[in-house]
């Protein structure tokens, strides 16, 4: 019998998968199995400059090698596809329109340089840069022929509000809007949604009931809860996994090719060694 649980694995093909990804994805698979549910593979390939088809091919191969199996994905299909974000633009545009109608987003013309200069205080070092609010209440006139999808949009966060959620793995979490994170970009003027908007739209459209991902995204989850609210949608449950670190305590990154699944396999490791 189907349990109604729907989980997903959502890799970004900008490099080869490493053990950290495998661990998160295997946890996601485990959660779906334990719950008697389904697992969906979604390829997060919106960044056209950095995503490469060779990495997407490698991804499918590495996932299979690591023992992952999914019920819906680019190679299998299902009723909530397509399963590549680059093929789902109309959904994201529709969501931006709905958020705009709620007036919870504002157009922003600040350049990176403006923001760097405005937030150069030493206490910002290494931390989250909070948007200083320049465009929050500033009128914005579209140029002739310019569409709303050619503008940066930020979500207006309820400053001072605590965004809290119960994490299935890490317990209660709380972040303060305007303090832990500021008004964040949901749409980029090059015509694509930010990661935050795209995953929320997809997790809703794909009927995901639990999101399993790395704990580096805890703050993103707080931001995303505000997007769910703005879209009038019920958020899924969340389960954040600890990050895998190397011997020096640094988290694994895609550029560390030596630790990629490819290299492990080449070195004669088996999926069980993972
Ligand atoms: N594509 C994102 C990543 O690779 C997925 C994050 C998520 O699970 O929401 O980090």
Image (cartoon, rainbow, N blue to C red):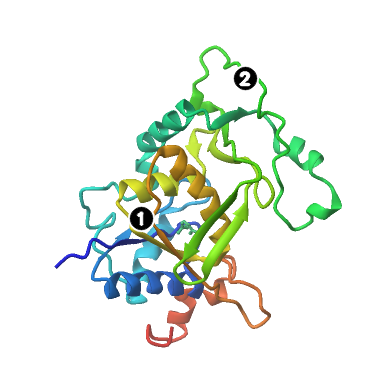
Q: Is residue 168 left or right of residue 175?
A: left
Can you tell which mark lies on residue 267?
none
- The outermost residue toward the left is 1
Q: Is residue 211 left or right of residue 110?
A: left
Q: Quadrant of residue 130?
A: top right
Residue 145 picture location, percent across and down: 51, 14
Quadrant in the picture for the C terminus: bottom left
Report whether the residue tagged 2 is closer than 8 Å to ligand 1. no
Residue 147 picture location, percent across and down: 49, 21
**In this figure, which residue is indicated by the disc labeled 2?**
140
Q: Would residue 70 be visible to someone looking at this image?
A: yes
**In this figure, which residue is indicated by the disc labeled 1?**
42
Q: Would residue 48 be visible to someone looking at this image?
A: no
Q: Quadrant of residue 212?
A: bottom left
Residue 198 picture location, percent across and down: 44, 45
- The outermost residue toward the top is 144
User: 44 and 36: which one is in front?
Assistant: 36
Tag 2: Cα neighbours inside 10 Å, few (<14), some, or many (≥20)? few
Instruction: Label 2: state its secondary structure.
Output: loop
Instruction: Label 1: state its secondary structure.
Output: loop
Identify which residue is drawn at 74% across, 39% down: 115
Quadrant in the picture for the N terminus: bottom left
User: 62 and 38: which one is in front?
Assistant: 38
- The outermost residue toward the front is 161
Q: Is residue 2 above or below residue 139?
A: below
Residue 267 picture location, percent across and down: 47, 85
- The outermost residue toward the right is 122
Asked whether disc 2 touches disc 1, contact meaning CB atoms under 8 Å apart, the reply is: no
């Amino acid at each position: 019998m189907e349990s109604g649980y729907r989980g997903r694995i959502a890799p970004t093909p900008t490099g080869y998968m490493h053990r950290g990804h495998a661990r998160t994805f295997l946890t996601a698979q485990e959660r779906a199995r334990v719950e008697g549910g389904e697992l969906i593979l979604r390829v997060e390939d919106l960044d056209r400059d950095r995503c490469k088809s060779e990495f997407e091919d490698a991804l499918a191969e590495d996932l299979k090698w690591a023992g992952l199996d999914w019920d819906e994905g680019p190679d299998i299909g299902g009723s909530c596809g397509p399963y590549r974000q680059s093929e789902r633009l109309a959904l994201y545009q529709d969501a931006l329109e709905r958020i705009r109608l709620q007036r919870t987003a504002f157009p922003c013309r600040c350049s990176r340089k403006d923001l760097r200069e405005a937030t150069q205080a030493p206490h910002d070092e290494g931390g989250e840069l909070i948007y200083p609010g320049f465009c929050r209440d500033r009128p914005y006139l579209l140029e002739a022929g310019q569409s709303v999808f050619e503008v940066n949009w930020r979500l207006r966060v309820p400053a001072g509000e605590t965004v809290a959620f119960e994490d299935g793995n890490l317990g209660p979490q709380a972040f303060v809007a305007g303090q832990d994170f500021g008004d964040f970009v949901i749409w980029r003027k090059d015509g694509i949604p930010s990661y935050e908007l795209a995953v929320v739209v997809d997790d809703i459209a794909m009927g995901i009931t639990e999101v399993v991902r790395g704990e580096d995204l805890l703050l993103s989850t707080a931001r995303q809860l505000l997007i769910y609210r703005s879209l009038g949608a019920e958020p899924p449950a969340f389960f954040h996994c600890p990050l895998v670190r190397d011997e020096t305590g640094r988290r694994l990154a895609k550029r560390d090719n030596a630790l990629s699944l490819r290299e492990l396999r080449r070195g004669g490791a088996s999926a069980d060694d993972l």
